[in-house]
Each structure stands twice: as C-alpha cells, then as structure tokens.
Image (cartoon, rainbow, N blue to C red):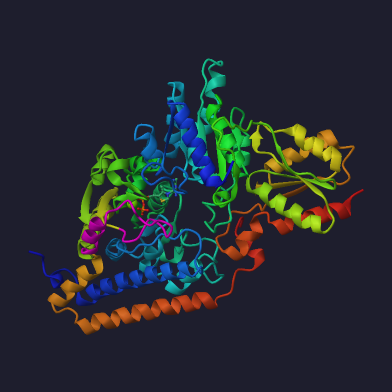
Amino acid sequence: MEASLRELLSEGELIEFYRQMVLCREFEESCAEQYSRGEITGFLHLYSGQEAVAVGCTAALHKNDYILSAYRDHAQAIVRGADPKRVMAELFGRATGICKGKGGSMHLFAPELNFMGGYAIVGGQFPIAVGLSWASQLREEDRVTACFFGDGSMNQGTFHESLNWARLWELPMLFVCENNFYGIGTEVHRASAQSALHRRTCGYDIPSEKVDGMDVIAVYQATKRAAEWVRERQRPYFIEAVTYRFRGHSMSDPAKYRSVSEHEVWKSRDPIPNLSRRLLAEGIASEAQLDEIRDRCTAQVEEAVQYAADSPWPEDGEVWEDIYV
Amino acid sequence: MSEMTYRDAINLALKEEMRRDRSVVVYGEDVALYEGAFKVTRGLLSEFGEERVRDCPISENTIVGVAVGAAMGGVRPVAELMTVNFALLAMDQIVNHLAKVRYMFGGQLTVPVVIRMPGGGGSQLGAQHSQSLESYFMHCPGLRVAYPAAPADAKGLLKTAIRDNNPVIFLEHELLYNSKGEVSEDPEFLVPFGKAAVLREGSAATLVGYGRMSILCLQAAQLLEKEGVSCEVIDLRTLCPLDGETMLASVLKTGRAVVVEECWRSAGLGGDIASRIYERCFDTLLAPVKRISGLDVPMPYSRKIEKLCIPQVEGIVQGVRDLLAQSY
Ligand SMILES: Cc1ncc(C[n+]2csc(CCOP(=O)(O)OP(=O)(O)O)c2C)c(N)n1
Ligand SMILES: [Mg+2]
C-alpha cells in the first residue's frame, strides 16, 4: 500500500513537483524541435524520462547546497531555478545565454543558484565536486555537495578516486547516480562488472541505496533522508536512482540497441503520469488544474524559444573574453 | 579503385588488416555493438566476433594501458578513443608508457599499438569536445602520428600503422568522415609514413597542411588560381615522421610558405614547421613564413564565433595575398 501523498508533502509541494517535471519535459521536447530546425546545433542530450531524479533530489536539498552534473544538464539547471529563457538562449548560441553562448547545451552554469556546472568529459565532475565540498568544509559552511552522474561514468578512474577521497576527508557529499541503464549504446552490465551499481561503494565504506528514479516522491524522500544524514555526520552518501531516458543518447542516436518492448515498459512508468495519476486519485488536483499547469509550461517554453530567437549573437570580440581574469 | 568515404576507407583498412592478421584486435567504447560513435567500425563485430571486436568501459587511461600490455603480450591492438579530447585522460599511458617502454627497457620489446582518435573542431561541440591536439602527440618522442586528409590516405596510412611495430596515434577529422575520394581496393595498398603528398603543383607559394587543413589549402589554391596565383599544396599525411624533404623542395621552388594548423598557435606544430623552413630555405624565402592557426582560445559553442577560431578557406586565401604583397 502506498502512503497517501498528503501525509508526506503539502499539496502545494506536490503540485510544484508536477509543474517542474512538465516544464522540463516541455523544454526538452522543444529543444528536439529546435535542433531539427537547426537553431540548436552540436551535441544535444535530452533528459526526457529522467525528470523525477532532478526534481525529487533538488527539492530535498537546501538552496545553498551545491549541485554538479554531466552534460545532460538542462533539467538540473532549470529545476535549480535557472531561467528557461536564458537556458534556451544558451542553446541557440546567443549572447543572452546563461554562459553568453560560449558553453552550449553541455555546459550550463549558474553560481548564484549554486548550480556548479555541467561537464562533458565523462567523470570530469567528480573531483571538482570533492573540491567544492572541501572548500565548504574549510569555510565552515553548512553545505552538502550533490554530484549527479550517469551509470557509465562509474568506470572512470575519477569516480573511484573521488569516492575514496570524499570518505577519507569526511566530506559532506551526496553522490547521485542516474542509472538509465546505458552509456550511449552500452548497457550497464556490459560495462560494469558489478551491475548493482549502488553496491560498488562498499570498497570506500560509503553507505548507499537504490531508489525508483521514475517516482519523484520516492526520490524526494530518499534524498531528504540521505541529505540529512550527510549533514549530520559530515560524510558522503550514495544514491542510485534507477531511471530511463526516453530518447536516444543524443540527437544523433536512434537508440536501435534497445528493444521496443523495453522502451514500452519504461514508458508506462513515465514519472509525469506516474505522479498525476496519484494527484488525481487523491483529489489533490483536478484534471483541469493539471491541464492548466501544462499549458502554462508550454507557453513558458514557447516564450523561451522566442526570447532565444530574438536575442543577439555574441560579438566577434567575445572569443577573446573570459580566458584570463 | 572505387569511390568511398573517408569513414568507409578506414573501415575497409580495419577489415582488411583483421582478415590478414589474426593478431589484430579492435576495441574501444561503443565500437562493437554500436559500431562506433561515428560508425567507423560498422560490420566489424559481425565479421570478426566478440573475441576480436570488443566494447569496453569508459576508462580511457586503461584503454591505452591495456593496449600497451596486449602488445607486449603479442597482440596487435587497434584501440579507439571515442574522440581525441578523451586522450587527455589517457596521457599518462600514452606519454609515460606507450611512448617510452621500448626505450626505457633498452629496446627489448616492441609495442605495435594503434590508437585511433577522431577530432577537430567545427561542429559546435564546445570547449571540451572540439580540440585539435596533434601538437601534443607530435611533441612526444616515441609516438608515430598520422593524420590523413584524403580517403585513400586514410586507408593506406591506417594499414601501414597497423603493420608498423611502433605505437601510432592515428588522428581522424570528424568533418572528413563523409568526404569522398577514389580508394584502392587492393589489400596490399599501403601509404608509407614520412612521405608527404603534393596535392597540387604551383609556383607562387607553398601551402602546407595536414588533416582537414590540407583540404582547406586545396580549396584556397583553387580560388587563388582564379586570381592568377599558382599555389603548391603539400599534405604532410604523417606528422611523425615528418617529410621535410618534399616540403622544403617545394618552398625552395616557390620562395613562399603558408603553414596551416588547426591547433592552437602557441607552441603549435606550425611553429616547428616554420622553423624547419627557415633553417633550410632562409636565403630563398621571398617573405616570412605565414602561419594560419587555430585561435589561442578554448572553443566557444556559438557557431557565430566558433568559426573565427578555426582556419577558414578565406583566411588562407587572404594569407597568400598578404604574403605576395609583403614579398621582398
Ligand atoms: C572521458 C569521456 N569519454 C567518453 C565520452 C563520450 N561519451 C559521452 S556520454 C558517454 C556515455 C556516458 O554514459 P552515462 O554516464 O551512463 O550517462 P548518460 O548519458 O546515460 O546520462 C560517453 C561514452 C566523453 N564525453 N568523455
Ligand atoms: Mg547512462
């Protein structure tokens, strides 16, 4: 028997989870369209299907906690509070983008939101997260550093070196593995000798757990508990959120290595209807309310696209800016 | 001969060498089942099976280290790094191990390893995915470095690389994969290392390039011809060994040299090449050697400004015009 949602969270919080997931989905699907129009170029890795992880985790963290991510980072940044207009402008390569059009899809950054970046080198974010966490320890700040990463990145040396380091220096870190079962076309059991990924932390004496990453409430609860544990003990913790990406690895990947039936099973567990069903069943929101939220998100994303399209390109001289202070 | 893409030419070289020599194995991230991020290894798994064509974890330093060990053990590995940018994670195994084991163990072993890496900029992949690191490899003694421009050379050089008993860094340009050219289907067609190609003869200036830069040089030469300027185009094909003779003979003939490099200008290979030209052609030069290089900046994403950072055909054309105007 599932606990009733009202016992866990306020109606406002629950509806906000729904709104954020829908906003992310609308944003990502709009990106796909803008990519096919040639407005967005380069690599584009969409988050559709994984929304419950970013939304549930972020909601359970404090505003001053640090968040780092890999290149599948739009939702992470938006949920943290980045303006979809400026994220879209970044993807369009415009001067008004969140990184002035210099970073692109894979490299969002918003220090005012403690969103400390999207990194495109698989495993690049681990040591940086350790360093951030160490800095907060030295400065006696009450901050957890949440480091998001994919299943594939756990085979990088930096993963192991960073977990060992985080435990050794007793750093308040939360490692969040988004296990979507694939690193590009390689399924997790073909890349990881131990495919129960959360069990890989035992060598570093870091406690871990696995959570249903298609269920935003479950993710929220697990993260809440974990973050409290980390804050209290000042030690790292590890969460494996089991999830799925509905699209290919990036826009150039037709994802032929996955069966239709596998895809269907995961589609039926889509985190958005997964939540809306419960909201309706428990009378927390009406169909009309949810529709209205969706319409608002659609409009917000359309506005973001318009803003991006109307924005100026960077000046030529911009290439020489920001290399050195 | 048959017309094929640069991608298919590399694919054919891999297949032919795997058919010829059972000790040749191919592995890397997503090379087997997925057939490569750029589809270069298409059909390899089905033809040669899982034992010789293997996917591996995202562990670049270990990818290269495993190649060193496998080569010591009698195998001929052709490993793929998904892109050259990830070679930076493997620099320890490349520079400290692959390049040095033969020397530091007194020549008692060989490491017949090929590391293939697509690279280069121009696809709006941002700062971490658009790098041209050829000078890094060229800087390190012990490594052979090949960087084909034409499909035929892609095939012939890769076959030579696989048969070579030295470690070879084999660079491929992502924007050339779909380019087409005539390629020999002879399984014994090889292109030797250390032999530059004269892509076009000319008299007023020598354009020196490698990889995609050679293609840009050729296009620039075609445009310049319409202005009545005749350029010779030299495609280096391998950066180590570097064919000084062909290049210098050309500069001695034309008296002017433009060196085009995609990498960053500071400490870039163009400086090395220019100095070789000065050392041997100082008296003949009608103007200082012109370098056209990637800008010394991390690559920005936005396509509006990305193109400013990479040599362009128009820039080469202008460079030659400047050189002619400047001549003593
Ligand atoms: C060091 C490095 N090696 C390889 C790549 C190419 N690459 C990009 S994403 C990826 C797969 C990563 O999978 P995972 O960590 O599971 O993240 P997901 O894409 O599933 O979110 C690979 C191999 C890279 N960007 N960096
Ligand atoms: Mg994954």
Name the spot of residue A265 as percent of width and height, x first.
21, 59
Q: Is residue B77 visible?
A: no
Q: Farthest residue in the left direction?
A: A1
**Camera-side residue of B318 and A204:** B318
Name the spot of residue B215 as percent of width and height, x first.
67, 49
Q: Is residue A163 left or right of residue A215?
A: right
Q: Is residue A80 left or right of residue B121?
A: left
- Residue positioned 26% across, 71% down in the render: A17
**Camera-side residue of B277 and A96:** B277
Q: In this rendering, is residue B257 above or below A54?
A: above
- Residue positioned 27% across, 49% down in the render: A237
Q: Is residue B99 visible?
A: yes
Extent of the magenta region? A245-269
Name the spot of residue B175 as percent of width and height, x first.
57, 52
Question: Which quadrant would residue A246 be assigned to in this image?
Answer: bottom left
Main SS of the magenta segment?
loop
Name the spot of residue A6 as percent of width and height, x first.
14, 73
Image quarter hosting the N terminus of chain B: top right
Q: Farthest residue in the right direction?
A: B328
Number of numbered discs overlaid on the protein picture: 0
- Residue positioned 42% across, 72% down in the render: A84
Is residue A248 shown in magenta? yes
